[in-house]
C-alpha cells in the first residue's frame, strides 16, 4: 500500500488521538481503581469507535481504520478495568 502525504497526516493524527486514551489506561491499571471512571462515557466512546471503524473499512481508509482500531482497544480495556476494579 502506497501512502500519500494526506494518509501520513491521518496516521500521525490518529496516533496522537489514540495516545490521549493511554494515560487513563495506565493510571487505572496501576492504581487498580476505576471508581472515578464513567462506564457510560467509555461505552459511548466504544460504540462510536466501532461505527467509525466500520465506516473506515467500508471506504477503505487506512488512517480511519488504524485510529479507530487503536482507540477501540484502549476503550475496551477501560471498560474491562471498570468492570474488574469496581467492587
Image: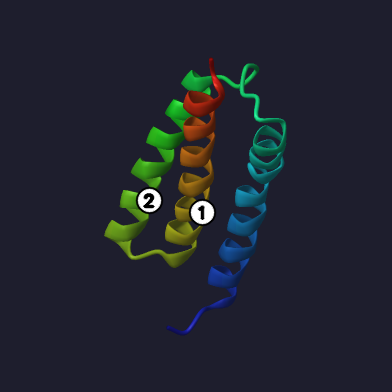
Give the structural element (helix, strand or loop) at label 2: helix
Query: Is residue 68 depicted above or below 86 in this figure?
Result: below
The mark nearer the N terminus, 1 or 2, is: 2
- Residue 20 place in picture, x, y as percent: 67, 44
Q: Residue at the front extreme?
A: 87
In the depicted view, which residue is nearer to us: 33 or 43?
A: 33
Horizontally, residue 14 falls left or right of residue 76, namely right
Check contact, mark 1 vs mark 2: CB within 8 A. Answer: no
Question: In the image as oriented, which residue stretches furthest toward the left?
Answer: 58
Seen at 62% across and 66% down, the residue is 9
Which residue is at a point 54% across and 35% down the rendered structure image? 78
1 or 2: mark nearer the eye: 1
Q: Does residue 76 appear left or right of residue 36 in this picture?
A: left
Question: Residue 53 shows which numbered tag?
Answer: 2
Q: Position of residue 56 (x, y in %)?
A: 37, 56
- The residue shown at (36%, 43%) is 50
The residue shown at (31%, 50%) is: 54
- Where is mark 1, residue-wise? 70
| Front residue (pair 65, 10) | 65
Label 1, label 2: how far apart the Cα atoms are: 10 Å
> From what the image shows, is residue 51 above or below residue 67?
above
Location of the N terminus by quadrant is bottom left
Which quarter of the picture shows residue 46?
top left
**Element type where label 1 sits in the image:** helix
Q: Position of residue 19 (x, y in %)?
A: 66, 50
Amino acid at each position: 500500500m502506497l501512502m500519500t502525504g494526506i494518509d501520513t497526516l491521518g496516521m500521525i493524527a490518529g496516533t496522537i488521538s489514540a495516545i490521549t486514551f493511554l494515560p487513563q489506561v495506565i493510571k487505572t491499571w496501576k492504581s487498580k481503581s476505576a471508581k472515578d471512571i464513567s462506564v457510560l462515557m467509555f461505552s459511548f466512546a466504544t460504540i462510536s469507535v466501532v461505527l467509525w471503524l466500520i465506516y473506515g473499512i467500508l471506504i477503505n481508509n487506512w488512517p480511519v481504520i488504524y485510529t479507530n482500531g487503536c482507540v477501540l482497544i484502549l476503550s475496551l480495556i477501560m471498560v474491562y478495568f471498570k468492570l474488574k476494579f469496581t467492587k
